[in-house]
Amino acid sequence: MTLLRPVHPLLATLAWWVIGLLVACVQIAAAADDGFRVVSAETRRVDDSYLLSAEIDYRFSERALEALENGVPLTLEVHIQVRAADAWLWDQSLADQRLRYRIRYKPLSERYLVSRLPDDKGRTFVTRQAAIAALGELDGVYLVSAQRLAPEQDYEVRLRASVDIEELPLPLRPMAYLRTGWKQSTGWTNWPLTP
C-alpha cells in the first residue's frame, strides 16, 4: 500500500509559479503572431520629387478583429519622416507627415471599406484578408523635393504604423489603453535616402 506524502508548502508554491510561467509563455508566443511590421520600403526619384513605396503587414490582435467584425472602424496612422542621417532626436525633420487610413466592415453589404482620411470614399473588398492587404500597400507617397536635399549629406527615411486608439468609440478607449491587444505598432523602420 502506497501512501501519499504531504508536499512541502514551499515546493507547492514553486510548482504554481512554474505553471504560471508556462501559461505566460504560451500567451506571449500566441501574441507574437499579432503585430505590425514593415515588409519592404523603397524610395525613388521621379522628376524633382522623392516618392515612397512600402508594404506593411498588419496582423491585428483578436480584440481588434472582433471589434472590426462588429462594425467598429479601425484607424491607422502611418508616420513618415525624412531626416539627416546624423540628426539628433530633437533636430527638426526635413519632412514629417502622418497619413491616416481607416478600415471598416459594412454588415449590410458584407463588404470591407478601406479609405485614406479625411476622404471617406475608398475601395471595397469582399474579404477581410484582401482589405487588410490593401491597407498595407503604400505606393507613390510624396516625401520631399529633391531641391531640399544637399548632395553631400546622408539622409534617412523613417516609417512607423500604429493603431490610433483616440479614433475608437469612446466606450472602447479606456480598455484599449489598458490592454495590450490594442497597442499595435511597427516601431520605427529606417532606411537610407541618397540624393
Image (spheres, rainbow, N blue to C red):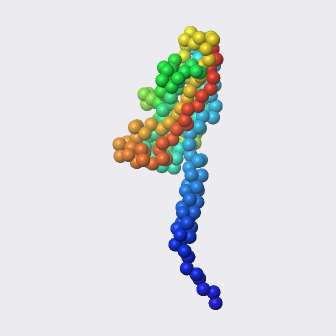
Q: Furthest-top residue in view?
A: 147
Front residue (pair 101, 154) = 154
- Splitting the image into 4 quarters, where does residue 117 fall? top left
Q: Residue at x 55, y 54 (%)?
A: 27
- Quadrant containing the C terminus is top right
Q: Nearer the viewer, residue 165 or 135?
A: 165
User: Do we see residue 127 in this rendering?
Assistant: no
Q: Position of residue 51 (x, y in %)?
A: 59, 20
- In the image, residue 137 above or below residue 127: above
Q: Residue at x 42, y 44 (%)?
A: 177
Question: Can you give x and y, in whole percent of width and height, for residue 176 in the image?
Answer: 42, 45
Task: Identify the residue shown where x is 59% and y is 82%.
Answer: 4
Quadrant where the image shows the N terminus? bottom right
Counting labels gives 0
Height in image: 106 above or below 153? below
Whether residue 33 is visible to the viewer of this picture, yes or no, is: yes
Q: Residue drawn 64% across and 17% down?
A: 194
Outermost residue on the bottom side: it is 1
Q: What percent of the width, then of the height, locates residue 3?
A: 60, 86
Where does residue 180 sit, x and y in percent of width and height?
Answer: 48, 47
Q: Quadrant of residue 187?
A: top right
Residue at the far left in the pictured view: 170
